[in-house]
Each structure stands twice: as structure tokens, then as C-alpha cells.
Image (tube, helix red, strand yellow):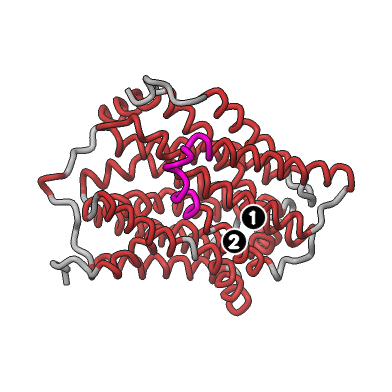
Amino acid sequence: MIPTKPMPEKEFIALAAMLFATIAFTIDAMLPALGIIGTELSPADPERATLIVGVFILGMGIGTLFAGALSDAFGRKPVIVGSYLFFIGGALVCALAPTLELMLFGRLIQGLAVAGPRVAGQAMIRDLYSGPKMASIMSLTMMIFGLVPAIAPLLGQAVMSVFGWRAIFVAVALFGVIASLWLLTRQPETLAVENRQPMRIGKIIEATKYALSNRVFRFSVAVQTFLFGALISMISTVHPIYDQVFDRGEEFPLWFGLMAVLSMPASFANSRIVAKTGMRAIIQTTLYAQLVITGIVGVYFWTQGHIPFPLFFVWNTSVFIMVGFTFGNLTTLAMEPMGKFAGLAASILGAVSTVFSVAISIPVSQMFDGTPRTLILGVFGSVLAAVVLMLWLGPRRPTDLS
């Protein structure tokens, strides 16, 4: 049955949140299984299992570059549902993978596919709402989405404890089945045929040249790339650190959930102060604070040879709080000058920052030596680079919005 009437607003918000939450659930649910997967599929080098996160992010970044244009050309629902079909297939490849290499192939497919719900889901909201109402819908969606990192590791560990780690990927596939069926049966297409835009490579190239010629866009993308690299480095190695350094592997889902809850208010706080304080000032202040916190952690580690768990947990949480105070502002800074190329520029921003962040996070995760050393260096170096870039960008210029 093809739906003809839009679903109720509350239901639509819940559906949109589920579309966005696909990313977080796919990453966070399998974090408790990284150690076991590494031991079983790569016994000679178990730490290679951290690539499961990086390869997924890489695929998502590549897919993001094309998902927006595809949804403008063919409609939101076909792109989302088609993406979920590939996503489910990738999850099943992971569930059945006899080798780590095949597992990584499945994760790459999942990453490419998840860009569809991510980008086309945002476009659906834009199709139906505008102005303050759209902002309200997005805020409510993000609030629900923010709960996923708090519960996904717990669900993943529960599934693994009963059915084994491979069942986590079956659960991820079921997540995709439920989301796609919900969309198919309840929500009509939001982009009318007459409003669709043919997908042209020339238009993508033109938008890319326009975006990269703007200094604010370039600096914003570069800063977000380094910060995303720090975040993915943390996500990739946090479970091995909990397990091997602090002997808290079994408790990890609870601590990770607490961290997610504690960091959730950052985005809300940013929305309350950004108009008065200014985006660049908030970004710079946040980066300075993170540089100090990471520096303290580093000095303690190199002078004492270890890190107390409470200090590590506070630092871990501070990295996620940093994201709440910076990512939205950096995205807004980048998009302000884009005008008619806003849609494609958003895809370029997401794709470039995501793909290149993997180049930062993979070396950090692969050099993990049973201590937080490489993670401290990776985060400190990434944040320091972001600080330098923000200072280089400087205050707003009269030509910044031209």
C-alpha cells in the first residue's frame, strides 16, 4: 500500500530520528565486540579490528558526496530505501564474514549506503518544513538521535552475550529493515516530480570549484576534518583502552552511555548562546579548553606513566562535548557563503571532512600499543591544528559572505 497522506508530525520526527540514528547505531552497537572480533578474525594483529570503524566512516564520506544529488534527481524515498537494501546486504556480509578483510568490505558497503538516509532524510525535513518550524523539527530529531549512543553499546553487548558477536550485525540489518518499511508504508514521497533536478557531473564540479574557492568554506572544512579525526580516533580506540588499560571492558557500555548523556546538553547550550557570543568565538574558546584538558592528560601520563580512570573518563567526555560546541557552528560557517550551491556544498562539506578524517584516525587506532599514548597524541595534534586554522581564519571579513 502506497501512503497518500503525510504521517503525523510526532511520528515523522520519530522516523527522521531513526534515519539519522542508523549511523550511530551501526557504529556504537558493535564497539563492545571489537576485541572479540579482532581475536577471532585477525589473531596475529587483533588491533586491526579498529579498522571496522574507520572503513565505515570512509564509506559514509564517499557516499555523502553523491547522496544529495541522487535524492534531488530520483526522490527521497527511492534513495533512502535503495540505500537501506545495500546497507542490509553489507550488514549480512559482516555477520557471515570468515575473514577481517571480508568484514571490512561489508563495512565499506554499509558506510556508502548509510549516506542515503543521512542526507535524503535531512532533505525530507527541508521539503516539508521551513524557517523556525524546520529548526524546531531538526532540534527535536537531534535530541532523540542523541539518545542512541547512550543505549546502542548496551544493546550490542546484550545481543552479543546471548547470541554471539555476529548477531549484532543481524540486529543492525533488522534496524535497516524496520526503518525502510516504516518509511515505505507510512510516509509519501516529499519531492514532487516537477521539482527534481537531473544529476549532472558538471554541476557537481562547478559547485566543488565554487565552494573550495571560498576561504571561509575551506577553513571550516579543514577545522571540522581535524576535529572529526579526533572524534573517530577516540571512538575507534576507547573500548580497547577501557578493556586493556582499565580492565573495565564489561562495564564499557554503561560508561559510554553515561558519557553520551553528559555530552548531550552541549548542542542545546550552544544554541542558546551562539547569537550573543558568535560562532567563531565559541569554536575558539572550546578548542582552547580542549587543548588544555588534553595537555593536562598528556602531562600526567608522561610524568606518572598512567592515567587514573576518572581523569580519562572526564577527558573522553570532554571530546564529545567539544563536538557539541563546534560541529554545528563550523557547518553554519561553511554554508553561509554558498548561496545557490548550498545543497551540493553540504555534500562536499560532509564528504571531504569525513573522508580525510579517516586519514587521521586510522593511523592513531592502528598504532594503539595498549596505552592511551597514541590517542593523546592524536587528539592533541588534531585540536592544535584546528586552533592554528581558526587563528588563521581570523575574525569575519567584509568579503566573507560574497
Q: Which mark is residue 317?
A: 1
Q: Position of residue 303 (x, y in %)?
A: 89, 43
**Labels 2 & 1 near each other (Cβ < 8 A):** yes
Q: Position of residue 279 (x, y in %)?
A: 47, 38
Q: Is residue 174 left or right of residue 2?
A: right
Q: For numbered disc 1, what is the local secondary structure?
A: helix
Q: Position of residue 354 (x, y in %)?
A: 49, 41
| Residue closest to the eye, 179 or 51 | 179
Q: Is residue 116 left or right of residue 259?
A: left
Which quarter of the figure has residue 346?
Answer: top left
Residue at (74% x, 42% y) in the render: 374
Q: Main secondary structure of the magenta part?
A: helix
The magenta segment is 267-282
Q: From what the image shows, is residue 243 above or below residue 220?
A: below
Residue at (34% x, 41% y) in the render: 66
Q: From what the image shows, is residue 272 above or below residue 168?
A: above
| The residue positioned farthest toward the bottom in the image shown | 162
Residue at (76% x, 49% y) in the render: 372
Q: From what the image shows, is residue 377 above or below residue 254?
A: above
| Residue closest to the eye, 9 or 167 | 9
**Number of other residues with Cα within 10 Å of mark 2, as a class: few under 14, some 14 to 19, many 20 or more:** some
Q: For numbered disc 2, what is the local secondary structure?
A: helix
Query: Alpha-carbon distance for marks 2 and 1?
Result: 7 Å
* Tag 2 residue: 262
- Confirm whether the magenta stretch covers residue 25: no
What type is the residue that disc 2 sits on?
A: Leu
Residue at (14% x, 45% y) in the render: 195
| The residue positioned farthest toward the front in the image shown | 276
- Quick one: label 2 or label 1, which is nearer the N terminus? 2
Quarter of the image that includes the N terminus: bottom left
Q: From what the image shows, is residue 153 above or below residue 215?
A: below
- Confirm whether the magenta stretch covers residue 277: yes
